[in-house]
Image (spheres, coloured by chain):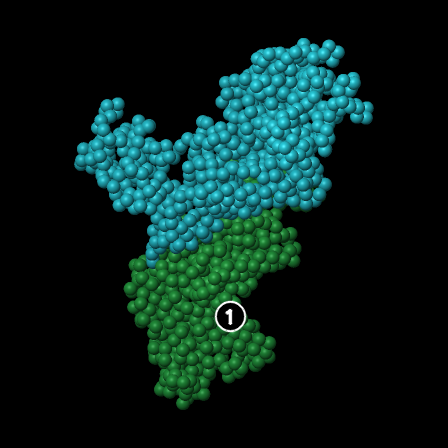
Chain colours: A cyan, B green
Amino acid sequence: MTETRGTASAPDALIVFTPSGRRGRFPAGTAVLDAARALGVDVDSVCGTRGICGRCQVVPEFGEFAKHGVTSSPDHLTGLAVKETTYRSRKGLAEGRRLACAAYMTGDLVIDVPAESQVHRQVVRKGLDLRRFVVDPVVRLRYVEVEQPELAVAGGDLERFRTALARDWQIADAVVALPVARDLQKALRDGRWSVTAAVREGADGERPEVVAVWPGFKERLLGIAIDIGSTTIAGHLADLGTGEVLASAGVMNPQIRFGEDLMSRVSYAMLHDDGAAAMTRAVRDALDGLAGSLVAAAGAAGAEAETDDVLELVLVGNPVMHHLVLGLDPVPLGSAPFALAVDGAVTTTAADLGLALRPTARVYLLPCIAGHVGADTAGAILSDRPHESDAVRLLVDVGTNAELVLGNKHRLLAASSPTGPAFEGAQVSAGQRAAPGAVERVRIDPVTLEPRFKVIGSSHWSDEPAFPASARTTGITGICGSGIIEAIAELYLAGVISADGVIDGSLAARTPRVIANGRTFSYVLSEGTPRLLVTQEDVRAIQLAKAALHAGAQLLMDHFGVAAVDEIHLAGAFGSHIDTRHAMVLGLIPDCDLAHVASVGNAAGTGALIALLSRASRAEIEDVVRRVEKIETAVEPSFQAYFVDALAIPHKTSPLTNLAKAVSLPARPAPGDAAGPTRTRRRAAAAATPSETQA
Amino acid sequence: MTETRGTASAPDALIVFTPSGRRGRFPAGTAVLDAARALGVDVDSVCGTRGICGRCQVVPEFGEFAKHGVTSSPDHLTGLAVKETTYRSRKGLAEGRRLACAAYMTGDLVIDVPAESQVHRQVVRKGLDLRRFVVDPVVRLRYVEVEQPELAVAGGDLERFRTALARDWQIADAVVALPVARDLQKALRDGRWSVTAAVREGADGERPEVVAVWPGFKERLLGIAIDIGSTTIAGHLADLGTGEVLASAGVMNPQIRFGEDLMSRVSYAMLHDDGAAAMTRAVRDALDGLAGSLVAAAGAAGAEAETDDVLELVLVGNPVMHHLVLGLDPVPLGSAPFALAVDGAVTTTAADLGLALRPTARVYLLPCIAGHVGADTAGAILSDRPHESDAVRLLVDVGTNAELVLGNKHRLLAASSPTGPAFEGAQVSAGQRAAPGAVERVRIDPVTLEPRFKVIGSSHWSDEPAFPASARTTGITGICGSGIIEAIAELYLAGVISADGVIDGSLAARTPRVIANGRTFSYVLSEGTPRLLVTQEDVRAIQLAKAALHAGAQLLMDHFGVAAVDEIHLAGAFGSHIDTRHAMVLGLIPDCDLAHVASVGNAAGTGALIALLSRASRAEIEDVVRRVEKIETAVEPSFQAYFVDALAIPHKTSPLTNLAKAVSLPARPAPGDAAGPTRTRRRAAAAATPSETQA
């Protein structure tokens, strides 16, 4: 090909690459790409120096560069080669850009490698916190030109293809399973002995594997990352070559028809012979549907995308979802000792799962941590990175159960708390899922005890004049998880609910909002149809849920040996919608400086995306999960005690040192004497008042 | 478990194992099995010292053994253990036998390891030449007891199973694919945390893989070796643990309906869109049927055998059969450059081929050698072992094409000769496959020119009184390959056919057996219905076929640099039925001492069986095939010249030095003057007269 150092008679020329600053001397006639490779400069290439892929674009910089001690001149580079003009006319090549594989040194040069020409490039996407990771997917495209078969020359199609892979890409020992060898036979002929191979490099120590081949040159490879929630299945479609996220979408989990929450689905599997298989089919069908939607959405946005180009699928989910999608029996997860069939990371094929993707596409599931702490939590760890934190962080993912991770870069603990589904709006009289029409924000005037609220789908508070019109389309249909949290916290702050969680029936004399309801009392949040009540049972359900969560956190803090946490990260949809101040008023989370309490979005799904795009991140999370200490709340004697203590509002185990100072708002006037809140409660009330109401 | 050397205070005792003669000293209390393992004595075990499998049976020998310098006494061994009496009552344990895992040393001992207790044992089976290979299958059973899951103790079912495999069998890095992990989850519970795993060790450097699990203890594992011929598919069912061949059977290849010979099947694939797929389905269905028959036959013979226990399938076949069964396109094999899609050994799964075996069962195909020299020839090499021969051997496998392998332990050459299907009875006027009713033996009286013959299905010659009755059930329906060879050789010896292959029409005046038939003459072999003629076209077809075979052999001899071969081995059904003397009269095979011409049976099928039972043999044949020099007759200029020379009977290229001396029978009286054979021909005639006719 080109001359390399030591073989030429011409004096060596200096080349400096930016931004890396790597430099070296090479004989005149050396291709810029070869110099880059010799120096370990990160320049991409799919076609292997054939001028087809355009991935190796560089920008020669000309002038005197005192900093680098070099004078770079246009004369120090060969002119535009035929493959560059061909590429320019076919796909466009910006002025000033060259293909590093087609430009040869004739003298000293400074060459800039733009970010998009690097193999390991940083990915940025709005709404996804993808800091500190670089795109390095497990599967890459490799273009090869294979020797044609000849009479009396040994070597089948497969063997000559392997020879080309070894020659052009130094991949000497790739596994090629028979289904791919079948495709290869045709692709070689259709592509006139040129093919593009998708080569997958799994875990360290595993041989690379060719998972797909296409005739001729191909440049787009897709991957999908999916978080299988009990309620919602959400995914991202990404270009594995560039790391670009092409589309994001979600669908309902169709397993809901077998049971609203996890345990009812496990029961369904236990009680019906074909129950687990039916749920497995349902979730796999949903994955196929979601993959189709994502590809269609990317296509609608102008990206060339076909389902057949999806070669890697990464899944996260809680243990029951994990087992059901894999076709493993979820029944052992329903009772002690909550035995997982598999807890390590799993790699299988689309064919094995019966997915409507290319059969050889690989499916990777992050490891599960324990019987109640699944691959979704592993994903949340991978995204939120508590294992790199100096501060002691509590990472909470609230769903049917709450998964808790506590620790820092030295040590991580994980547990699950049996919160039940109250936080998701279930087991609450007027509860419903977070959907249009659901009450999601609540304020209660501590003087008049009158409520005002917002519903999903309307941007107005219920006491604003525009509200009736704006809420007409959605109606006011129920109370979602974040709504019930706020309602109960506000009722406590207004003195309607005692620290023991009892609705004060004596207030029925003061306001028609408090009504008798059998032997207990309820608070009327909305008089419409349906009438929305906060009942004594609702308060009890939330008390049980928040006590479980709080006790779990306390247990982990005990094991870790801290009395308080430095920061709290709330993951998941509930974590995104919840008002952290109300959560602290209720005692949902341990005491913490509110400035250090943050919602981190769908961290599980983001973790799946990171695992999709970064090979190194898989080894990382597998290693971290192995080191996580698993705490089983069910066998910890102190859990029950913490649980009982935490039933009170906010709770008895830790002082509210941070609540009052978290916000600095003027105190409201105290309400009437008889039923006025205590002094502590007033301070908490002040803290919990959202700033928007002060505007 | 037991004390090992150096940890005990008791003085060490001497143990001598026979027949290996291995000896060593161990502390009293050492289990005989542990001593055997420490000394590298080959003792089998499936259950891992639990006294369940009974594979480690040994025979303590008592008395003074001067040869070994040891006095072995019944007192030097612990008494019958509970697990031995349990095993004896459950499965029987012969008097004098002990389980090596349950018998502990208390003094000096001589212990005999019977052949059936060795892992690597010799296999002998009537009718199969299985010398020089020991049973060492790629897949073995391993019984393990797995820790039960416990609350708050980490490790899924799979991970605890792996721990047990590593602990009991030192298998630390086994691959367990998801389908097996699914089975494992259930098997662990059904087997109360005890399972038997089938662990497959593929090629060197590959990680072992668990391919199946069963609850509890399991001791039988099956494998099938199949030779896929164009006409017949024949297989053996073997116990992979013992190497015992439990059943052998054959079925017709149902692809025959798509074309009688290979090239017509390739044409079918070329001309019909779904042609190759239809033939693929047909042959796979036949494999399923054959597997079922083999298992049923083994069951009928008293062996416990289930299709589900078949975990390994080895296939051989010519390149077209190889490609069709794998679902590869055979069309490129139909024309130059005869490019194979894959030529190396292939391992895939029953699931991938859609076979009705356990989906994770593995299918191994021996490597192909060249576009016309397939895995069947590799099997023949593995069985016949020319690569270990001192003598220069010609190994010939005659089918639609003739595959030729020439060489010795220093060097092997291979080629295929385009004989066409005449040797199989096709393209011959009265030709038919070797089936009941087909003429298979022919003698022609050189004086009267009258024929006598035998048909398949009757044990009498046609001139014996019992013949009409005995042939009544089959009829006389045609002439098979070996029959036409003998007929033409005999006609030549009787002077009816000239050395140029012309039927002498002047003989019509002497005998009604020679008749005019258009512009040429025919010989009437049988006047029945149908009338069986040997036509001039038949002679031409056989001349072309034998010339191709002879020219191919000559070409290989040229490349190898020898003027003659030391020995000739004829493989395949045709090779088994052909009379080697007639073959030499016709010039089918090169000149060779007839004492060194032997039929070696279905060497391809035997090679498949060896590959099934011996892991080492796979590496061996893959290595040998890589080193075989491939000769392509189509591009060799000398092939055409040899071919033309070889058209004469016997042929012009090599002298018949061995033919006359091969047998020492009295010469027959010379026939009449006019049409009498030449002197050479008379000698050949004497040589060709089968001894049975002299009895």
Against A257, residue B154 (above or below) is: above
- The number of callouts visible is 1
Q: Residue at x 32, y 58 (%)?
A: B560
In the picture, which quadrant includes the N terminus of chain A? Answer: top left
Q: Is residue A254 visible?
A: yes
The furthest residue to the front: A465
Q: Residue at x 56, y 25 (%)?
A: A599
Against A163, residue B492 (above or below) is: below
In the picture, which quadrant includes the C terminus of chain A? Answer: top right
Q: Position of residue B132 (x, y in %)?
A: 47, 51
Q: Chain of mark 1?
A: B
Against B594, residue A447 (above or below) is: above
Disc 1 designates what residue?
B434
Task: For label 1, count other residues whose C-alpha is less than 10 Å away and answer few (under 14), some (14-19) or many (20+).
Answer: many
Q: Residue at x 37, y 68 (%)?
A: B548
Q: Return the residue nearer the eye: A530 or A688.
A: A530
Q: Position of residue A110 (x, y in %)?
A: 26, 30
Q: Return the residue nearer the eye: B115 or A49.
A: A49
Q: Residue at x 68, y 45 (%)?
A: A274
Query: Image quadrant of residue B298?
Result: bottom right
The furthest residue to the right: A519
Q: Position of residue A166 (x, y in %)?
A: 36, 43
**Secondary structure under the numbered disc 1 in the rendered image:** loop
Residue A403 appears left or right of B512: right
Q: Is residue B134 visible?
A: no
Query: Image quadrant of residue A270?
Result: top right
Q: Return the residue nearer the eye: A99 or B439.
A: A99
- Please name the amino acid that badge 1 sits on: Ala
Residue A336 appears left or right of A396: right
Q: Position of residue A528 (x, y in %)?
A: 71, 31
